[in-house]
Amino acid sequence: MIKVKMLLLSMLIALLSMSSNAQTQPKNQETVAIKTSAVCDMCKKTMEKAMAYEKGVKSSSLDVDSKVLTVVFDSRKTNVDNIRKAVTETGYDADDKPAQERAYKRLDDCCKKGAH
């Protein structure tokens, strides 16, 4: 009986340790929030699609109401400055960095600052 209790206790401890490990963020994974000049759902689609092509980016999500782009990335493959640069190359401001003019001009009219 004692052996069965010990076995069950060991299994319980193993399961708890595995579940706590599964909830921790991977070692080289970072998250950044970038204030953008996005104004509509089309901006959201454009920016999230652009981020999907960036090396090291795991996921991105733009909250249109707050204009904040949240990006999860592998810090071994990219960094915050590269992500901000990618945002500006898409035609949007990224924190204090202005959008690249050429990219901004290619945006649809609804996506330009002051369009709403």
Image (tube, rainbow, N blue to C red):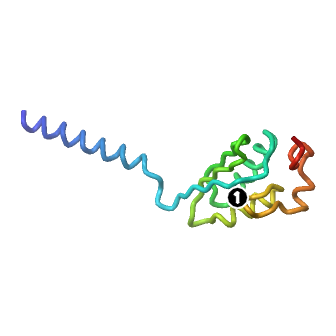
Looking at this rendering, what residue extends furthest in the top direction?
1
Residue 60 spot, x, y in % from top left = 65, 49
Answer with the quarter of the image where residue 110 lies: top right
8 and 65: which is toward the camera: 65
Horizontal relation, residue 45 to residue 14: left or right: right
Q: Residue at 78% x, 39% y: name it.
A: 41
> Left or right of 11: which side holds 86?
right
Q: Quadrant of residue 42?
A: top right
Q: Where is 65 relative to 47, above or below?
A: above
Q: Quadrant of residue 7?
A: top left
* Residue bearing mark 1: 54
Local crowd size for mark 1, using a 10 Å CA cut-off: few (<14), some (14–19), many (≥20): some
**Residue at x 81% of width, y 61% of height:** 89
Image coords of residue 96 (percent x, y)? 74, 63
Is 90 left or right of 54, judged from the image as shown?
A: right
Which quarter of the figure is the N terminus placed in? top left
Q: Secondary structure at mark 1?
A: loop
Q: Could you tell me residue 103's position as x and y percent?
A: 87, 58
Quadrant the C terminus occupies: top right
Say how many tags the image has: 1
Query: Eyeballing the image, is 98 above or below 61?
Result: below
Q: Position of residue 49 (x, y in %)?
A: 75, 48
Q: What type is the residue that disc 1 sits on?
A: Glu
